[in-house]
Amino acid sequence: MSQTITIDPVTRLEGHGKITLHLNDAGVVEDAQFTVTQVRGFEKFSEGRPFYEMPSLMARVCGICPVSHLLASAKAGEAIMAVQIPYTAKQLRSIANLAQMIQSHALSFFYLSSPDLLLGMDADPATRHIFGVAAASPAIGKAGIGLRRFGQTIIELLGTKRIHTGWIVAGGVTDALTAEKREKILAMLPEARTNIRLALDWYKSILPNFPGEIATFASEPSAFLGMVGEDGMFELSDGTLTLIDPKGKAIAEGITAEDFDNVFGEAVEPYSFTKFSYYKALGYPEGSYRVGPLARLNICKHMGTPEADKELAEFRQLESGPVQSSFHFHHARLVEILYGIEKVEEILNDADILSPHVRATAGVNRLEGSGFSEAPRGTLMHHYKVDVNGLMRWSNLVIATGQNNHAMNRGLLQVAKAYVRGNELDQGMLNRCEAMIRTFDPCLSCSTHAYGKMPLEIRLLGPNRELLSTVRR
C-alpha cells in the first residue's frame, strides 16, 4: 500500500518546516516536498513607517543574519535619498557583514551540520548534536565556538550589540571605529585563523567518507546567482550580480539592484509559504537557480586574499566546471570564513578606517529604491516605495532561501529516492533528507515575507492517495 512519511519539524535549521515523502506500493519514493509552514508579515506591518526606520526594523527579521537585512535595507534607503555614502562607512559595513558571515557560517557548519559529518549520518539522534561533537572532538567543538564568538564580538564592538544593532543606517553608519576597538579586533585574528585552518584540514580529510551523499544531495545541474566586484572578484557588500548557467557560462552580468525586479520573478506553490525565485527570461521552473556560498565560489574569478585564493583553486578541483553537488556548500562556507578573516585584517589596516566621516544625510529625493547584499545564505534584496513624506507605502523582500527553494525540493526528491525505502525505514534514511536541506542552511523565518494574496490549497486524499476534494484560496 502507498505510504506518506512526514518529518515535522525538520531539525537543526532556523525556523519551522516539514518534509513530506510519498512512497508507492513498492515502498519507493515517488514524490517529496519541503514545506515552510510559518508566515511572517514584515512587508505588511512596515507600511506607514518612515523609510529611515526600515534598517532597524528589518534587522528584526532574523537574529542570525540581521546585518544582511540592515545593509540591504540601508542601501534601499540610500537609493530613495539619492546619496553616495562615505568611503569609510562602506569599509566599516563590509567588516560587519564579514563578521556576520563568519559567525553564521560557523553556526551552520559546526552546530547544525558537523554532527552528521563527525558522528555520521546514521549516528544515534540522542548524541547527534553539538554536545556530541564537543565530546567526540573537543578541538572541533572549540573551533566552532571560537569562530562564532569572533564574528559576534566584532559586530558588538562596531555596533554595541551582537544582534539587531541599529548601527547601520541609510547614509552610512552612526559611529566611527575607535583605535581601541580596532586593536581588540586585530588581537582576535590569530586564534580565528588557527580555528578555521583546523576546520578546513579536518573537513577535507573526512570528505571521502561521503561519496553517496555528494552524489545525491541536490547535485542536479543548475544556474547560479551571486555578487561580484571589479574584475569578477569575490564580493559580499558592494557589487553587481552575475547569473551563470550549469556549465559556467554567463547568462546575465552587471545586474544592479534597480534591475532585479525586471530580471527575476517569484512563483508560488500551494504546499509552501516560501516563494520560488526564477530568471524571467527562462520562466518557472526552468529559470530556477541557486545562491549562497556554493554559487559565489562558482561565479567569482578570484577571492582576492592569499589563503582563500589557494583554497578556491583546490575547491574547484572537486568537479569539472561549476561545483554542482550541494553537499559542497559545507566546504564553500569554510573557504568564505577564511576569506572573511583575511579581509577583516586587510580593511582594518586601511589608512582611512578610523576616519570620523561615516554618514551622509538627505531627505526624500526618489519615491522608490532597491538595495541588495550577499547574506550568508545568498543574495538578499529589499525593494521599497514611499510617499512624498518618506512614509512606506509598499515593500518586498527577496530572500536567499526562496531563491534556493526549487533546488531544495528537487534535491529532497533526489536524496529520498536514493536512500528511503518504506519496507526498511530507519533514522539514517530520514536524517539524510534533513541533512540535504541543512546543506543550504535555509532561514525559514527570513523566507516567508510574501506580499499580496498567498495561495493556499487543502487536498483531501483517499486511502490510495486518490484526490477526493480540493479547496483553494
Image: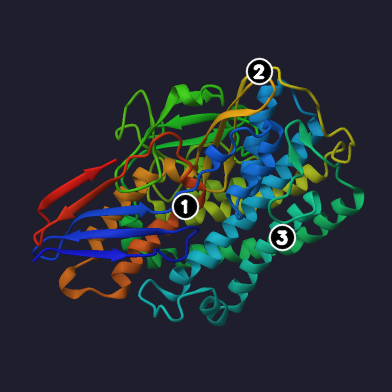
Query: What x and y, as percent, mark residue 384?
Result: 58, 28
Residue type marked 2: Arg
Query: What x and y, as percent, mark residue 404?
Result: 41, 44
Mark 1 to mark 3: distance in Å?
25 Å
Q: Quadrant of the N terminus?
A: bottom left
Q: Nearer the viewer, residue 101 or 63?
A: 63
In the image, taking residue 204 as reference, residue 345 lies left or right, namely right
Q: Earlier in the sequence, mark 1 or mark 3?
A: 3
Q: Is residue 306 visible?
A: no
SS for callout 2: loop
Q: Quadrant of the C terminus?
A: top left
Residue type marked 1: Leu
Q: Earlier in the sequence, mark 3 or mark 2?
A: 3
Q: Earlier in the sequence, mark 1 or mark 2?
A: 2
Residue type marked 3: Phe
In the picture of the structure, the residue carrying the numbered disc 1 is 444
Residue 301 occupies quadrant: top right
Instruction: Identify the residue at image location x=15%, y=62%.
Output: 28
Q: How many marks?
A: 3
Instruction: Identify the residue at image location x=58%, y=48%.
Output: 61
- Give me the disc on residue 331: none
In the picture of the structure, the residue carrying the numbered disc 3 is 150
In the image, taking residue 468 as reference, residue 345 lies left or right, namely right
In the image, taking residue 231 as reference, residue 4 lies left or right, namely left
